[in-house]
Image (spheres, helix red, strand yellow):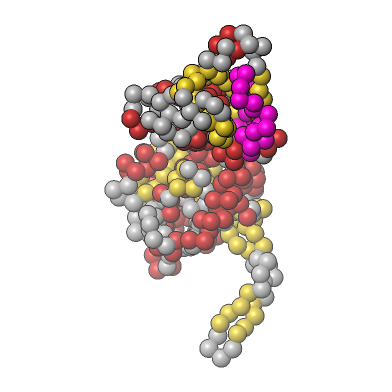
Amino acid sequence: MRIAAIIVAAGAGARAGEGPPKQWRPLGGRPVLRWSAEALLAAGVSPLIVVVPVGDEARTAECLAGLEGWACVNGGATRAESVQAGLAALAGVEDAAAVLVHDAARPFVAAHHLVELTAALANHEGAIPALAVADTLKRRAPAALETVSRANLWRAQTPQAFRLGALRAAYAAWPADAGEPTDDAVVVERAGGRVALAAGDPMLMKLTYPEDFTMAEALAAQLQPAPALATRIGQGFDAHRFGPGEAVMLCGVSVPHDQGLIGHSDADVGLHALTDALLGAVGEGDIGDHFPPTDPRWKGADSTVFLRHAADIVAAKGGRIVNVDVTLICERPKVKPHREAMRAKLAELLELPLDRVSVKATTTEEMGFTGRREGMAAQAIVSVLAPG
Ligand code: MG
């Protein structure tokens, strides 16, 4: 059976507080309207008619960009007029088709709802999702509070499903003096149609009040598929020459020495190698791209700034640092007495548990430039979990 659908998004949504009407508000990074439009189209609905206020056509096109199989028409002053505008847009669809009428303010419609509702149309003119009333109902009367029996009371939700011919005929027959129908099922019922109650779903909640958005955001976060994370490896290397001084900065810790390290910044080889490793893991160039040595701002700079910047780039790309491992290469100063302080400093800077941070040291057996004590070097390797 062909299934067409109408999403009614023409309301002003005054109860949902300040801001744009609720169908346009972001929910989990997508406008509220897009949630149900995507779900209905993915479930095979064709066509989908979106009924919006006059002037909101461009906004609708932006909201539904990239989706195919929908069209937009303008709504009327009442919900019933808007539904009828949607029905008019389905003029070319056969009476035997099913039509779903859905409120834009119920974002979490799913394919299984459509299956259950359209199955019920085999022997009914309409089918609606409905939840039994669970709370005790009270009526505030002038004299006293009255308790209303909730037996056999149901909360009607949307989407509501109908045989298209039955809904067309029912709206055509709705008496002008009958007032405003509050849903579509009542129109079909009044015309003598049989409407089945299908299983409702708390997920079909209607966003009505500002606090509803808080709950919907939590639900949206659970429904969004978590991005697939891949393990990435980055490595870095750095070297600096010894010069006059009384201490060297290594992994953010000042280590007393009879020389210093020469560099444009504080010449912290450990932090420079580690910064490059992080940038490498996420394909963001190297430390010189981000902090050019020609830039006077970085003269004598505290290299912890560089490391934090690289960590922020990783985080901004949705990445999470798994572990880091730094090897310092020198004959002197002796690193071992300061190693735990360096690990603690790196753990603090990268907000990592201590067991994910390693600092090691080695000599080169008096070979090469580090062996001749001309300078020192550092290597770093990191692993990062990042999308893609
Ligand atoms: Mg350097």
**Residue sitting farthest toward the left:** 55
Q: In which quadrant of the rendered view does residue 39 lie?
A: top right
> Going 64% across and 27% down the picture, which residue do you hit?
335
Task: Report the front residue among 370 and 182.
Answer: 370
Number of marks in the rendered image:
0
- Magenta span contains residue 319: yes
Q: Magenta span covers which residues?
A: 318-344
Residue 60 visible within the image: yes
Residue 352 visible within the image: no
Query: From the image, which quarter does the C terminus lie in?
Result: top right
**Residue sitting farthest toward the top:** 367
Residue 372 against residue 52 in the figure, above or below: above
**Residue sitting farthest toward the front:** 258
Residue 344 against residue 236 in the figure, above or below: below
Query: From the image, which quarter does the N terminus lie in?
Result: top right
> Going 47% across and 22% down the picture, which residue do you hit?
243
The image shows residue 238 at horizontal and vertical percentages of 52, 19
The image shows residue 151 at horizontal and vertical percentages of 69, 70
Residue 153 against residue 303 in the figure, above or below: below
In the picture, measured across the screen, residue 262 lies left or right of residue 328, that is left
Task: Report the front residue among 194 and 352.
Answer: 352
In the picture, measured across the screen, residue 292 lies left or right of residue 254, that is left
Residue 170 against residue 247 in the figure, above or below: below
Task: Report the front residue among 367 and 303.
Answer: 367
> Going 43% across and 24% down the picture, which residue do you hit?
263
The image shows residue 253 at horizontal and vertical percentages of 57, 35
- Magenta span contains residue 40: no
> Going 43% across and 54% down the picture, which residue do you hit?
22
**Residue sitting farthest toward the bottom:** 143
The image shows residue 374 at horizontal and vertical percentages of 52, 15
